[in-house]
Image (spheres, rainbow, N blue to C red):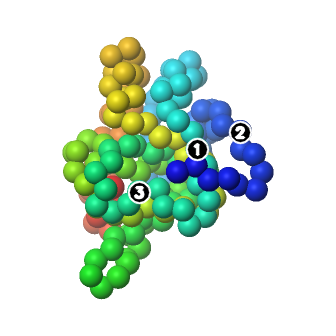
Amino acid sequence: MNAPLRSPLKFDVQGLVQAMAHNQTNDRLSCSLGTVQWEMLGSYMQPFALAQGQVLIEQGAADRTLYLLESGSLSVHYEDDKGRVRLAIVAPGSAVGEGAFFTHSPRNATVQAAAPCKVWCLTPIRFAELSNRHPTIALELAMALGSLLGRRLVNKPKRVAVT
């Protein structure tokens, strides 16, 4: 999953917080946490880099990992028997993988880096640990993801982009 990029990247969860603050689209993840809470959440997530073209989520996979995008952009594609159809471009400050994270269903689309990306991942196991140790933070994240999922489901073109 990790990919070497041209220069070493530094990861700080505050970069993710800034990306969410700057994303003014309907597709942003709006999570109201303080600095200390973000640092705590960051300790449960794993940051990594994606090179342009690298696949993050494979359509049909059983994985339930959630991904938060700090920088770059992600392209969401559905693949049917006639080929690929682009469904959405995800900008920094948003998330992908929320559908399978909540439903335990296979991924319904492929997500790949449209540009070099900084991504933070949260596995279901780490989310369960967060829920047990810091329920207020876990609840805020779950509510923010639920809000994002709801906005995507209301928007017909983005409805099928829920991964």
- Residue drawn at (32%, 25%), measured in percent from left and top? 128
Q: Position of residue 137 (x, y in %)?
A: 41, 22
When asked about the image quadrant of residue 104, the answer is top left
Whether residue 136 is visible here, answered yes or no, is no
Question: Does residue 157 sit above or below 127 in this rendering?
Answer: below
Determine the residue positioned at 41% across, 57% down.
57
In the depicted structure, whether residue 147 falls above or below residue 96: above
Q: Which of pointers 1 and 2 lies earlier in the amino acid sequence?
A: 2
Q: What whole-number distance in Å separates the C-alpha atoms at marks 3 and 1?
A: 14 Å
The mark nearer the N terminus, 2 or 3, is 2
Numbered mark located on residue 16 in the image:
none
The three-letter amino acid code for the residue at tag 2 is Lys
**Numbered circle sitting on residue 10:** 2
Quarter that holds the C terminus: bottom left
Question: Which residue has dot 3 on it?
Answer: 57
Please give the name of the residue rendered at 53% of the width and 25% of the height, measured from the top-left corner.
43
What amino acid is labelled 1 in the image?
Phe
Left or right of 123 on screen, residue 74: right
Left or right of 158, for residue 105 = left
Determine whether the residue tagged by mark 2 lies in a helix, strand or loop.
loop
- Residue farthest toward the bottom in the current orientation of the protein: 82
Location of residue 134 by image quarter: top left
What is the C-alpha distance between the residues marked 2 and 3?
Answer: 23 Å
